Image (tube, rainbow, N blue to C red):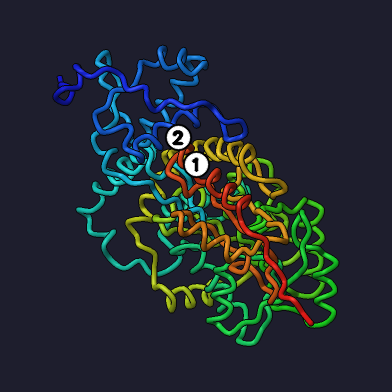
């Protein structure tokens, strides 16, 4: 049996870090966890220091035992605590070496990528992968739409969104960005227009710029793209492609209703516009209408893109492109070969194993539950109004007119806090005054609570933007 570090049993619990609670700064268990973090950062608690027993701390802080248990559990998940059973709970030996951590809320990544459960899933996936390495197949070229087994796994992944998907209509791609570029190359020409929400995925804007396609901004409201605005734009010039993120739109979190999806499809059909439906968040939402591709047979051709980056892990570099019935596959495969030749087959194999074993579905459920809790934390801390979905990866926070988003972002960066500005998503010269916050970027809920509290303080203390005097 492993013995505690030398001297631990002689130490009395350190209670000097305990502070009063503050209203409006998140759940009590997260406040307790943050107090411990702050005490470690400030040197009040050091590696090897013993914390009070949970019952004693609950009595000292005036909370119930469950609250303290949740706080200690949160800290253990962050590897800040070392429990020694009856010997007590101690600050982990590695904790004293860390300064105040930076939190990057600028990238939309799933939560819990460093969790024990995720690590176990990775171990299982790579164990299965190891059994195949001796055959040599994984390390060879895999040019084409994907193996039969991987496309069958893709069809299984897509079933909740689209129902039964013929595996022969699926192309396994090295990420959604590659799939999007392939569709643009196969279905448009240089100089063509791509209609998109006026605030949209930065990857689309980058691809359009590199491939010399124009982007036609279409006005939105709280529900997403406005059909009347799309129709009006088509009266001036019909775009070759319509790009949509219909569920938990990036960055505004808007979700198109079933009626609006039908209206946009009808306009696309009437004007002969090909649709690209980029749908990374549908499984997380849990309440979204069926994708446009599920009802597109009688409307317009819809290329459906489903990435694993937002619901599982971006490191898998795996996405599935569903080609509409009747559309040729070869132009897409030619485009993919010219961009990336093929996905990393080892990562595709891990993804397929997760899907077949049910591990992928379990991960989605865990991430969804975690994101709901993180959204609840954000709701208690962030200033109103802002836009969010109860299980979304991000929130969209419009800033008061008095604030300069660029100065705000610089201040946040100086305090080790990364956020995304509205101009990264804008298809227009005037991007508006807002920021996107990605809740999955924090390593745990305690870090997220601290980061959002820090950001709220920065916003409240930010100086007003003054117009120059004109005479």
- In this rendering, position of residue 213 left or right of residue 451: right
Relative image position of residue 53 (x, y in whole percent) = 36, 15
Relative image position of residue 54 (x, y in whole percent) = 40, 16
Mark carried by residue 252: none
- In this rendering, position of residue 217 left or right of residue 381: right
- Residues packed near mark 2 inside 10 Å, few (<14), some (14 to 19) or many (20 plus): many
CA distance separating discs 2 and 1: 7 Å
Q: How many marks?
A: 2
Mark carried by residue 34: 2
> Mark 1: which secondary structure?
helix
- In this rendering, position of residue 12 left or right of residue 427: left
**Image point (68%, 41%), residue name:** 287
Quarter of the C terminus within the rendering? bottom right
Q: Can see residue 274?
A: no
Q: Of residues 316 and 129, which is closer to you in this image?
A: 316
Relative image position of residue 404 (x, y in whole percent) = 64, 64
Label 1 near label 2: C-beta < 8 Å? yes
Residue at label 1? 450
**Image point (51%, 67%), residue name:** 177
**Image point (49%, 31%), residue name:** 30
Relative image position of residue 72 (x, y in whole percent) = 40, 25
- In this view, which residue lies farthest toward the bottom? 191
Q: Of residues 110 and 403, which is closer to you in this image?
A: 403
> Mark 2: which secondary structure?
helix
């Amino acid at each position: 049996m492993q013995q505690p570090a030398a001297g631990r049993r002689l130490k009395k619990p350190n209670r000097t870090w305990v502070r009063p609670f503050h209203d409006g700064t998140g759940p009590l268990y997260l406040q307790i966890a943050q107090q411990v973090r702050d005490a470690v950062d400030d040197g009040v608690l050091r590696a090897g220091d013993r914390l009070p027993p949970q019952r004693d701390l609950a009595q000292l802080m005036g909370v119930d035992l469950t609250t303290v248990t949740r706080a200690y559990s949160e800290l253990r998940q962050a590897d800040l605590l070392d429990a020694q059973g009856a010997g007590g709970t101690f600050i982990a030996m590695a904790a004293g070496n860390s300064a105040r951590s930076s939190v990057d809320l600028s990238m939309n990544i799933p939560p819990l990528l460093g969790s024990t459960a995720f690590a176990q899933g990775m171990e299982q996936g790579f164990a299965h992968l190891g059994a195949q390495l001796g055959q040599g197949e994984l390390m060879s070229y895999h040019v084409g739409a994907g193996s039969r087994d991987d496309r069958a796994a893709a069809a299984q992944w897509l079933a909740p969104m689209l129902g039964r998907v013929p595996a022969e209509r699926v192309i396994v791609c090295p990420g959604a960005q590659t799939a999007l570029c392939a569709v643009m190359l196969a279905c448009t020409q240089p100089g063509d227009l791509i209609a998109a929400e006026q605030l949209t995925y930065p990857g689309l804007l980058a691809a359009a710029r590199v491939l010399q396609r124009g982007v036609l901004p279409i006005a939105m409201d709280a529900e997403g793209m406005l059909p009347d605005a799309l129709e009006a734009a088509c009266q001036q010039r019909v775009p070759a492609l319509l790009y949509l993120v219909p569920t938990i739109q990036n960055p505004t979190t808007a979700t198109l209703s079933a009626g609006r999806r039908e209206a946009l499809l009808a306009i696309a059909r009437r004007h002969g516009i090909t649709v690209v439906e980029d749908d990374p968040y549908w499984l997380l939402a849990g309440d979204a209408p069926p994708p446009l591709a599920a009802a597109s047979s009688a409307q317009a051709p819809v290329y459906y893109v489903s990435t694993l980056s937002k619901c599982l892990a971006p490191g898998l570099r795996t996405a599935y492109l569903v080609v509409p019935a009747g559309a040729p596959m070869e132009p897409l495969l030619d485009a993919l070969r010219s961009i990336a030749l093929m996905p990393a087959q080892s990562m595709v194999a891990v993804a397929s194993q997760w899907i077949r074993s049910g591990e992928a579905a379990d991960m989605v459920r865990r991430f969804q539950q975690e994101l709901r809790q993180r959204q609840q934390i954000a709701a208690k801390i962030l200033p109103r109004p802002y836009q969010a979905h109860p299980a979304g990866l991000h929130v969209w926070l419009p800033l008061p007119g008095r604030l300069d988003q660029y100065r705000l972002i610089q201040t946040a960066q100086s305090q080790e806090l990364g956020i995304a500005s509205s101009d990264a998503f804008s298809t227009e010269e005037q991007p508006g005054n807002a920021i996107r916050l990605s809740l999955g970027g924090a390593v745990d809920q305690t870090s997220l609570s601290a980061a959002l509290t820090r950001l709220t303080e920065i916003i409240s203390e930010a100086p007003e933007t003054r117009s120059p005097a004109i005479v």
